């Protein structure tokens, strides 16, 4: 708790590079395209669950990936659906298939934007949505959309630091499920 408090004080002085109104606007547009592609929302495609998520992700996951276009920017999108059982334990595959919306905790999304968006971090845009498609607000009151933190902000161990964690993925592509993403 003390780290979060100190981090919050630090963030108040220096605006974080994420969660801005522009980030939330882009995230809302991205959600619409992901829903159209049936990657999120009540009409999303069903897919096989797998276990092995590590915090902040849940143990039971479904991952979908595809190219989508948002505001004229075509990019590779990776949607990780994070499921949890009603009792707080890992959701089972049977539970998820029977009622995915009931067990869906959050959708965590990586979208590779145009070259130059964030060249130090492979141009990834990060966002966390609740099951209704609203951008999640973290414990510090920050919208979880955009260039979600990096080790340079002094918060490398923060539980909501997408960039610092995914920078460790093999293949220098920030993606854990494969060695490289589709060619740009």
Image (spheres, grey):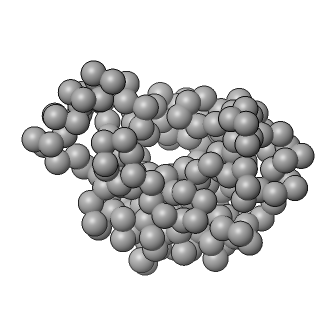
Query: Which residue is nearer to you in this view: 66 or 98?
Result: 98
Residue 166 pos. (x, y %): 48, 35
Q: Residue at x 89, y 46 (%)?
A: 94
Residue furthest to the left: 13
Q: Looking at the image, is 115 positioned above or below residue 150?
A: below
Residue furthest to the top: 2
- Count of all numbered marks drawn on residues in the image: 0
In the picture, measured across the screen, residue 34 lies left or right of residue 15, that is: right
Residue 134 pos. (x, y %): 48, 64
**Quadrant where the N terminus lies?**
top left
Q: Looking at the image, is 117 positioned above or below residue 147?
A: below
Q: What is the quadrant of residue 44 in the picture?
A: bottom right
Q: What is the quadrant of residue 57 in the picture?
A: top right
Q: Residue at x 69, y 45 (%)?
A: 83
Residue 54 pos. (x, y %): 60, 29
Residue 156 pos. (x, y %): 34, 27
In the picture, measured across the screen, residue 52 lies left or right of residue 114, that is: right
Q: What is the quadrant of residue 51 in the picture?
A: top right
Asked if residue 125 shows in the view, the reply is no
Q: Looking at the image, is 18 positioned above or below residue 178?
A: below
Q: Residue at x 35, y 54 (%)?
A: 143
Asked if residue 3 shows in the view, the reply is yes
Q: Residue at x 77, y 64 (%)?
A: 45
Query: Which residue is nearer to you in this view: 72 or 42?
Result: 42
In the picture, measured across the screen, residue 55 lies left or right of residue 88, that is: left
Residue furthest to the front: 87
Query: Which residue is nearer to you in this view: 12 or 163?
Result: 12
């Amino acid at each position: 708790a003390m780290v979060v408090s100190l981090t919050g004080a630090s963030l108040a002085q220096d605006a974080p590079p994420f969660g801005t109104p522009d980030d939330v606007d882009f995230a809302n547009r991205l959600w619409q395209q992901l829903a159209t592609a049936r990657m999120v929302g009540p009409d999303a495609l069903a897919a096989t669950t797998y276990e092995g998520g590590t915090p902040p992700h849940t143990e039971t996951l479904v991952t979908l990936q595809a190219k989508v276009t948002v505001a004229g920017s075509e990019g590779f999108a990776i949607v990780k659906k994070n499921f949890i059982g009603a009792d707080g334990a890992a959701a089972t595959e049977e539970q998820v298939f029977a009622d995915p919306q009931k067990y869906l905790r959050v959708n965590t999304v990586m979208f590779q934007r145009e070259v130059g968006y964030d060249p130090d971090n492979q141009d990834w845009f990060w966002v966390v949505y609740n099951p209704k498609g609203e951008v999640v607000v973290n414990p510090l009151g920050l919208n979880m959309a955009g260039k979600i933190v990096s080790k340079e902000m002094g918060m490398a161990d923060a539980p909501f630091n997408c960039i610092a964690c995914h920078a460790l993925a093999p293949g220098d592509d920030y993606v854990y499920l494969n060695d490289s993403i589709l060619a740009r």
